Amino acid sequence: MTHLPVRRLLVDLDAPVQRHWCGGDPFLTAWFNALSMSFPVGEQFFIDSVRQGLKALPADRQERFANEVQGFIGQEATHRRIHGLFNARIAAHGLENTWEPRAKARLALMANADARHGLAITAANEHFTALFAEWMLTHQQVLDGAEPRLKSLWLWHSAEEAEHKSTAFDLYQALGGSHEWRVRWMRRVTLIFLTDALRQTIHNLRRDGTLWRLSTWRSGWRHLMARGGLFRESWVAWRAYFRRDFHPSQQQSTASEDWLRDNANQYQRVGAG
Ligand SMILES: [Fe+2]
Ligand SMILES: [Fe+2]
């Protein structure tokens, strides 16, 4: 069982956020904004899936997961609340969240599905999030030009994603979820996630009036595709998910622990955690 403390991030999100808050870079700003737009709806789905998964376990096997699930829910609930505040700030820039209604419509189709489907979808998304988190924590210079409070927001979220990346996966396994369905959902989630993330990023850039600048596309290439870019760096780790003996804990680094230790003044632990 993994201990997952809930932390309250000590940042003020009442103050306005600059239009190009990520170092004046329209692409990076639009990309991070897009991801943030997906978090409130996505993280609520993860919470519901994990809660439902725990309930589906026989009573005598629930105890092993109960604390971890509570910590997972606490962490994701905090993320979605804080990103909701951040999203309200960036909405003031004239952006429009088209990802959320698309995700809501798709997720509504899962309402009465077996708990293992929700968990497989959550585990696949959590793998994506964990890859993104590892990249963020090991490429913190990407956020160097951001205000300290926004840098903290993204790195705190990343650190906790790395911490709880096994929870949905372990519940899925405990419920006897198959390898075939796990990888089938990963294929679908990959397609849906990348399409949605790129669509929303482009939409944000279009509303921002910076879509057709060469510098925007250069930044996109450099931060996603070039050496050191997110997609290029994460490809091997993404593919590992398709191995039969894959487990999220196989991709462990100290980046999350390091950030949480070195930035303990940025957050407060909540409750007994
Ligand atoms: Fe999260
Ligand atoms: Fe998560």
Image (spheres, grey):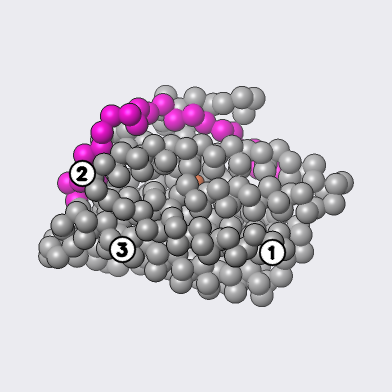
User: Secondary structure beneath disc 3?
Assistant: helix
The amino acid on which the numbered mark 3 sits, given as a three-letter code, is: Leu
Identify which residue is drawn at 66% across, 75% down.
180
The quarter of the picture where the C terminus appears is: top right
* Precedes in sequence: disc 1 or disc 3: 1
Which residue position holds label 3? 224
Residue 136: percent from left, percent from top: 37, 50
Q: Which residues are magenta?
A: 1-25
Identify which residue is drawn at 73% across, 45% down.
65
**Residue 249, magenta (yes or no):** no
The quarter of the picture where the N terminus appears is: top right
User: Secondary structure beneath disc 2?
Assistant: loop
Q: Are marks 3 and 2 in contact (CB under 8 Å)?
A: no
**28, 237: nearer the viewer:** 28
Which residue position holds label 2? 19
The vertical placement of 153 against 240, above or below, is above
Residue 135: percent from left, percent from top: 39, 54
Answer yes or no: is residue 127 visible: no
The amino acid on which the numbered mark 1 sits, given as a three-letter code, is: Ala
**Residue 2, magenta (yes or no):** yes
Which residue position holds label 1? 113
**16, 142: nearer the viewer:** 16
* Precedes in sequence: disc 3 or disc 2: 2
**207, 222: nearer the viewer:** 207
Mark nearest the camera among 3 and 2 is 2
Question: For mark 2, does the 10 Å Cα neighbourhood hold few (<14), some (14 to 19), or many (20 or more) residues?
Answer: some
The amino acid on which the numbered mark 2 sits, given as a three-letter code, is: Arg
